[in-house]
Image (cartoon, rainbow, N blue to C red):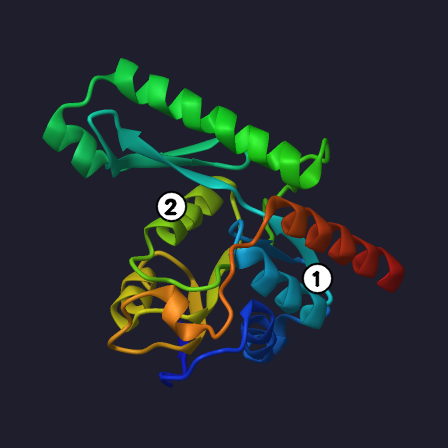
Amino acid sequence: MLVLFPMTRSFRDRHEGGQELAALLMEYADNPAVVVLGLPRGGVPVAYEVARALRARLDVLVVRKIGLPSQPELAMGAVASGGVRVLNNEVVDMLQVPQVVIDSVAAHELREVERRQRAYRGEAPFPDLNGRIVIIVDDGLATGSTMRAAVRALRQLRAAKIVVAAPVAALETVRSLQAEADEVVCVSAPQFFQAVSLWYEEFSQTSDEEVRSLLESAASHTASSR
């Protein structure tokens, strides 16, 4: 299912984008099966507003690309929170990448995933997503490669339903993600996209400290509403 309002407008900041995105997701409000995951770092302020509006748990899904050693920008796959590894078999087969190389790069990136998880959530375990409705949020989707890896990771973690959500996304990317996710929701999907930053008036880098602060604030809101 695709929910799309193809406007060409900008947002004041990520928090405003999250508030407008949340308005399109209210069917998931007050559902204990729902978990909202932000893609760090820029997706977390957006996800925070979504989780607060839906009165749902907020967490993060860290995704790291497994790049080819000689061409780091060429992804052989990705690793994600929960110890998930997803391979791009087309690239691996075409380039005949040895398994030992894949394992080495994947292990390095998985250590970085674990480091970032500790930085964001301390020793708290990654949530069990088996049978859950997962709303995975980013601040914008240009090529969608990170989000695509995230969706595939969530499939391995046995999420019952995966909803991709972002305030703004390239129209072609939204269409391609329909084949990956159960639902794609965005506020604006311009045909001529160029870059995520162009659709925000304020687009400063989100810090690790801000991510931690938003996760702590969301946890306290969730606890007080029970």
The single residue placed furthest to the top in the displayed view is: 100
Q: Amino acid at mark 1?
A: Ala
Name the quarter where the C terminus is drawn.
Answer: bottom right
Among numbered discs 2 and 1, the one appearing first in the sequence: 1
Residue 118 appears in which quarter of the rendering? top right
Residue 61 appears in which quarter of the rendering? top right
Residue 109 appears in which quarter of the rendering? top left
| Real-space Cα separation, disc 2 to disc 1, in angstroms | 23 Å
The reply to whether residue 202 is in sight is: yes
User: Where is mark 1, residue-wise?
Assistant: 56
Name the mark on residue 41: none
Q: Position of residue 187 (x, y in %)?
A: 45, 78
Callout 2 environment at 10 Å: few (<14), some (14 to 19), or many (20+)? Answer: many
Above or below for 121 versus 180: above
Q: Position of residue 24 (x, y in %)?
A: 54, 79
127 relative position to 116: left or right: right
Task: Tell me what residue is drawn at x 32 percent, y 51 percent.
Answer: 145
Instruction: Give 9 or 48, whichever is nearer the viewer.
Output: 9
User: Where is mark 2, residue-wise?
Assistant: 149
| Count of picture labels | 2
Callout 1 environment at 10 Å: few (<14), some (14 to 19), or many (20+)? Answer: many
Q: Secondary structure at mark 1?
A: loop
Q: Position of residue 3 (x, y in %)?
A: 42, 77
73 relative position to 78: left or right: left
Q: Position of residue 43 (x, y in %)?
A: 52, 57
The reply to whether residue 135 is in sight is: no
Task: Tell me what residue is drawn at x 36 percent, y 51 percent.
Answer: 148
Above or below for 42 versus 64: below
Q: Amino acid at mark 2?
A: Ala
Q: Secondary structure at mark 2?
A: helix
